[in-house]
Amino acid sequence: MQITEKTVKEVVVLSIRGKILMGEDIAIKKKIDELVEQGRHKVVVDLAEVPYIDSSGLGELIRCYTTVKRAGGSLKLANLTQKIVDLLTITKLVTVFEYYNSVDEAINSF
């Protein structure tokens, strides 16, 4: 899994490439912790290049969401595949995460 970061209009966009699996997902949490320490609390996670998330990876996304929320910020998801939307629906996490069809839509929602 690879994470690239860019900032657009004070919003940090984290683009993830690869599967989010047990053992590999810790990089996301580390990155979120760094951002929160820097006072950067507007985050969009771009999942366009994530074909699969296992239960551990989903748990890490929830931990990231909680970390940002507790810091007074907001974490939003963008470019979800249908499989990931289905996973969020089955787990009822569609009521927790805000998600958008594109990164631009997510950025503009702040």
Image (spheres, rainbow, N blue to C red):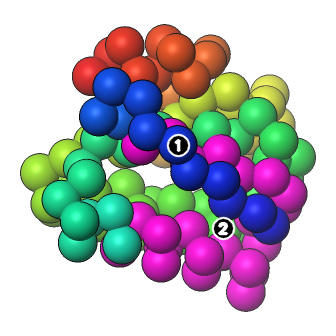
Q: Residue at x 76, y 34 (%)?
A: 48
- What's the CA distance linking mark 1 and mark 2? 22 Å
Q: Residue at x 67, y 59 (%)?
A: 3
Horizontal and vertical percent for residue 36?
26, 65
Check the picture and name the quadrant holding the N terminus: bottom right
Residue 12 shows up from this direction: yes
Q: Earlier in the sequence, mark 1 or mark 2?
A: 1
Q: Helix or strand or loop: what does disc 2 sit on?
A: helix
Q: Residue at x 35, y 73 (%)?
A: 33
Please tell me which residue lies in front, 89 or 110: 110
Check the picture and name the quadrant holding the C terminus: top left
Horizontal and vertical percent for residue 89?
61, 35
As drawn, which residue projects farthest toward the left?
Answer: 72
Q: Quadrant of residue 86?
A: top right
Within 10 Å of disc 1 (Cα), the crowding (few <14, some 14-19, many 20+) is few
From this view, report whether residue 2 is shown above or below residue 26: above
Amino acid tagged 2: Gly
Horizontal and vertical percent for residue 94?
49, 34
Amino acid tagged 1: Lys
Total numbered circles: 2
Q: Quadrant of residue 2?
A: bottom right
- The numbered mark at residue 85 is none
Decide whether residue 23 is among the magenta residues: yes
Residue 97 shows up from this direction: no
> Does 107 sit left or right of 49 as displayed?
left
> Does 31 sit left or right of 110 as displayed?
right
Residue assigned mark 2: 57
* Boundaries of the magenta span: 12-33
Q: Helix or strand or loop: what does disc 1 sit on?
A: strand
Residue assigned mark 1: 6
